[in-house]
Image (cartoon, rainbow, N blue to C red):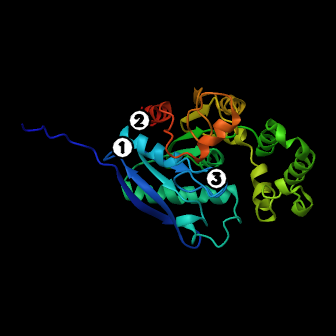
Amino acid sequence: MILPIIAVALLVQTPLTAPGPHGRLAGTLTDAGKDAPLVLIIPGSGPTDRDGNNPLGVAAGSYRLLAEALAERGVSTVRIDKRGLFGSKDAVADANAVTIADYAADTRSWIAAIREKSGAKCVWLLGHSEGGLVALASAQDAKDICGVVLVAAPGRKIGDTLRDQLRANPANAPLLGPAMSAIDSLEAGQPVDAAQLPAALQPLFAPQVQLFLINLMAQDPAKLAKAVTVPMLIVQGGRDLQIPRADADKLREAQPAAKVAIIPAMNHVLKDVTSDDRAANFGTYADPSRPLNSDLPDIIARFVKR
């Protein structure tokens, strides 16, 4: 018996670099083939790597899974390490000495590098969580940008989001007074004495990140969204414990031309959750074997290939 020959498309992933301030920025190109749309995946907050993981307990592999799923749908991606971290550690001496404008400058460097590598006329920006804010800041100049995809992105100022996140967990009740006071100070541009805060709050308001927090809290996502002139897609999970539906609504209100997709079962790390159990939801953050929400890559692929 002679078995038929079946052609299997191989997933092609190659290293890619872009110029950084003092050294190279590093990422991974997942190539879906000639003429495929190119999407730059901009990571979320903290020491998050190109796969969507960080050493603070997130190992969901969300960006890697998304890149692989998009490649299967004919969409190429570049996922990246942030300046000063992981493969991009030589780009700057201090990863915490950064602003949103700095991340936007890095995004511009990536756009140029991707276009040089691929010959593409433009690049799509996909920002996840805080990365959505970076995508919006980068798209204030639409040159060489095809459009913007915001996934679980803030639509309100970060101080308001942080207040809601802290209030949402009943266990934080004893911490709310000092936490709200610290947020108020940072919003006013004033650092706080982290040593005087409860121990549970000290990592959140660590001295080395306070200048970044001050810059971050000054950003207005809705105002930035209103000024974007390229196509925009807003994707929000119905079981996201960090960014609620209200943020997607705020972004859509600012940019009525944007497309909006609400995925009821998806959480913040782009996995499905079938209950309101907080522990089960957060449990998906450390589970790389749990599959990506299946609707997300379809929605993104349709948008960037239309």
Left or right, 293 with respect to 163, comes to left
Frontmost of labels 2 and 3 is 3
Say which residue appears at 45% left-offset and 37% top-offset.
304
Q: In which quadrant of the rendered view does residue 163 lie?
A: top right
In the rendered image, the residue lying farthest to the left is: 1
Disc number placed over residue 65 in the picture, else none: none
Nearer to me, 265 or 219: 265
Say which residue appears at 57% left-offset and 51% top-offset.
59
Left or right, 42 with respect to 297, comes to right
Residue located beneath label 2 in the image: 305
User: What separation in Å lies between label 2 and label 3 (alpha carbons)?
Assistant: 34 Å
Residue 5 is at least partly visible in this image: yes
Nearer to me, 249 or 280: 280
Say which residue appears at 65% left-offset and 41% top-offset.
282
Q: Which circle's residue, 2 or 1, is located before the other in the chain? A: 1
Left or right, 299 with respect to 269, comes to left
* Amino acid type, label 1: Ala
* Amino acid type, label 2: Lys
Which quadrant of the figure contains the C terminus? Answer: top left
- Measured as percent of width and height from the top left, residue 44 is found at 62, 50
Label 1 environment density (alpha carbons within 10 Å; few <14, some 14–19, many ≥20): some
Disc number placed over residue 57 in the picture, else none: 3
Nearer to me, 232 or 277: 277
User: What separation in Å lies between label 2 and label 1 (alpha carbons)?
Assistant: 8 Å
User: What separation in Å lies between label 1 and label 3 (alpha carbons)?
Assistant: 34 Å
- Above or below for 36 versus 188: above
Nearer to me, 230 or 303: 303
Contact (Cβ within 8 Å) of mark 1 with mark 3: no
Disc number placed over residue 36 in the picture, else none: 1
Contact (Cβ within 8 Å) of mark 2 with mark 1: no
